[in-house]
Amino acid sequence: MNMGQIVTIIVGLILIGFILWWFFGKHQEAVGDATVSQNDQEATITVHGGYSPSTVVLKQGVPAKVNFAMKDSTACLSHVVFDKLGVDKDLTKQPVTTVKIPTNKAGEYDFACGMNMFHGKVIVK
């Protein structure tokens, strides 16, 4: 083996390790709480290379809105989909898109990008 082949093998192994870590590794998730004022609550999720925070906690029984602040032009992140709620919103039409979340009972509402590659969760408790 010559030096070029050895370098190629090493770079390939490093890339395989990175891909395995990216898709299967444990990544720390940011958790955010809603801001409660008077008789409603609101949380903001920044969309930039993913969702930050990726998990939002809401109080049960208080009307809630989750705002998605679009900071990314990636096609995958152009939509946010809440399957349980039947919501599919285009995030590119305005800088901030609001989704109303029912808080009448405790539960979790998963959301994802239009291609189901980036995920997040809204927890009502």
Image (tube, rainbow, N blue to C red):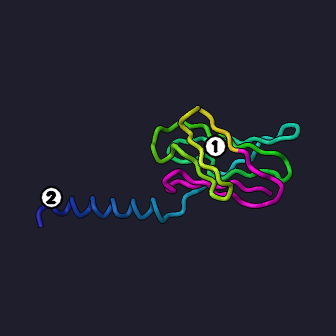
State the SS at label 1. strand
Check if residue 110 falls in the magenta segment. Answer: yes
| Left-right relation of 81 to 75 | right
State the SS at label 2. helix
Q: Nearer the viewer, mark 2 or mark 1?
A: 1
Check if residue 97 falls in the magenta segment. Answer: no
> Residue sitting at 82 percent across and 59 percent down?
105
Question: Which disc number belongs to residue 10?
Answer: none
According to the image, label 1 marks what residue? 45
Residue 91 placement: quadrant: top right
Residue found at the far left of this picture? 2
> Quadrant location of the C terminus?
bottom right
Report the amino acid beneath label 1: Ile
Residue 50 percent location from the top left of the image:
53, 48
Question: Which disc number belongs to residue 4?
Answer: 2
Q: Nearer the viewer, residue 48 or 116?
A: 116
> Residue sitting at 80 percent across and 52 percent down?
103
Answer few, some or many: residues within 10 Å of disc 2's Cα (few below 14, many 20 plus, some between 14 and 19): few
Answer few, some or many: residues within 10 Å of disc 1's Cα (few below 14, many 20 plus, some between 14 and 19): many
Residue 22 percent location from the top left of the image:
45, 59
> Residue sitting at 66 percent across and 53 percent down?
55
> Quadrant location of the N terminus?
bottom left
Q: Which residues are magenta?
A: 100-125
